[in-house]
Image: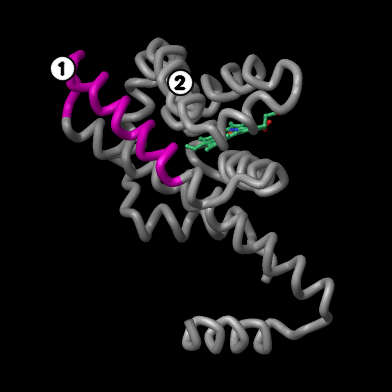
């Protein structure tokens, strides 16, 4: 069940329709992305901080918020630069971000609304600065690709842990899930 981040990246890019036009638009606006990233980070962490559960996670260790602000700015800018044209290095980075969130216990219920906040805030910023709808769409697509990485990491890690612990086959595991879902 181990996920190959490189294959996953190309599969998600084609599933979401992340085109070469989207990539060009993002690259052409990379400086703008870097410029607005600190403001986006402020909005993002203010949003997380308003939620009691997430605020506790954010402040669980010394200096975490500070580190996170910096990593958020990097993450945000990388969506525009694509690192290696949204290739293997990009995919490895996104997979690692997913794994880190699983390790800290951050699940879909936290990540999906958080990404919605990013999409909303960046949309407001784009509008305020008269940026195009096409750029907004391109950003929305790459945000969704990044989101699938974090979400999929949660599933992959949980499944791998159960298989390792129990020695079950993948087929049995999937049948048990289907049966469980039927009985709910
Ligand atoms: C849009 C969704 C999110 C994005 C894009 C994002 C981005 C990131 C990035 C880039 C890192 C650094 C990974 C690294 O060190 O390599 C990180 C770590 C982390 N994130 Fe998120 N994050 C998201 C959602 C959340 C949510 C909802 C929480 C809930 C509190 C959260 C809490 C954390 C924590 C605690 C760390 C580890 C910080 C540390 O101790 O170094 N993140 N995140």
Please tell me whether residue 169 is drawn above or below residue 132 in the rendered image: below
- The residue carrying mark 1 is 130
Vertical order, 27 against 146 (above or below):
above
Q: Position of residue 173 (x, y in %)?
A: 66, 82
Q: Tell me which residue sits at (57%, 18%) in the image.
A: 69
Report the front residue among 52 and 54. 52
Span highlighted in magenta in the image: 112-132
Q: Give SS at disc 2.
A: helix
Residue displayed at 38% across by 26% down: 27
1 and 2 marks in contact (CB < 8 Å): no
Q: Are there few (<14), some (14-19), or many (20+) residues within 10 Å of tag 1? A: few
Residue 116: in magenta span: yes
Q: Describe residue 139's horizontal placement relative to residue 61 as left or right.
A: left
Where is residue 171? Give x, y as percent. 65, 87
Locate residue 77 relative to residue 158 in the image: left or right.
left
Q: Earlier in the sequence, mark 1 or mark 2?
A: 2
Q: Which residue is mark 2?
A: 46
Q: Is residue 146 left or right of residue 18?
A: right
Q: Nearer the viewer, residue 36 or 13?
A: 36
- How crowded is the residue under tag 2: few (<14 C-alpha within 10 Å), some, or many (20+)? few
Secondary structure of residue under mark 1:
loop
- The label nearer to you, 1 versus 2, is 2
Write the residue at 67% across / 71% down. 1
Quarter holding residue 89: top right
Q: Nearer the viewer, residue 8 or 73?
A: 73
Residue 88 is situated, as x and y percent measured from the top left of the image, at 60, 46
The residue depicted at 40 percent of the width and 10 percent of the height is 35
Q: Magenta residues: mostly which secondary structure?
A: helix
């Amino acid at each position: 069940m181990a996920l190959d981040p490189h294959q996953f990246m190309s599969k998600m890019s084609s599933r979401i329709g992340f085109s070469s036009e989207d990539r060009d638009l993002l690259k052409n606006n990379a400086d703008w992305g870097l410029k607005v990233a600190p403001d986006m980070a402020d909005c993002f962490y203010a949003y997380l901080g308003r939620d009691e559960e997430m605020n506790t996670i954010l402040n669980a260790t010394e200096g975490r918020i500070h580190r996170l602000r910096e990593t958020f700015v990097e993450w945000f800018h990388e969506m525009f630069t694509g690192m290696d044209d949204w290739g293997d290095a990009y995919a490895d980075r996104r997979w690692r971000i997913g794994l880190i969130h699983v390790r800290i216990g951050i699940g879909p219920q936290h990540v999906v609304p958080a990404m919605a906040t990013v999409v909303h805030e960046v949309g407001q910023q784009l509008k305020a600065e008269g940026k195009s709808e096409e750029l907004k769409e391109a950003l929305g697509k790459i945000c969704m690709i990044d989101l699938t990485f974090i979400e999929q990491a949660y599933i992959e890690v949980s499944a791998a842990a159960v298989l390792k612990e129990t020695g079950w086959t993948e087929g049995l595991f999937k049948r048990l899930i289907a049966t469980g879902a039927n009985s709910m």
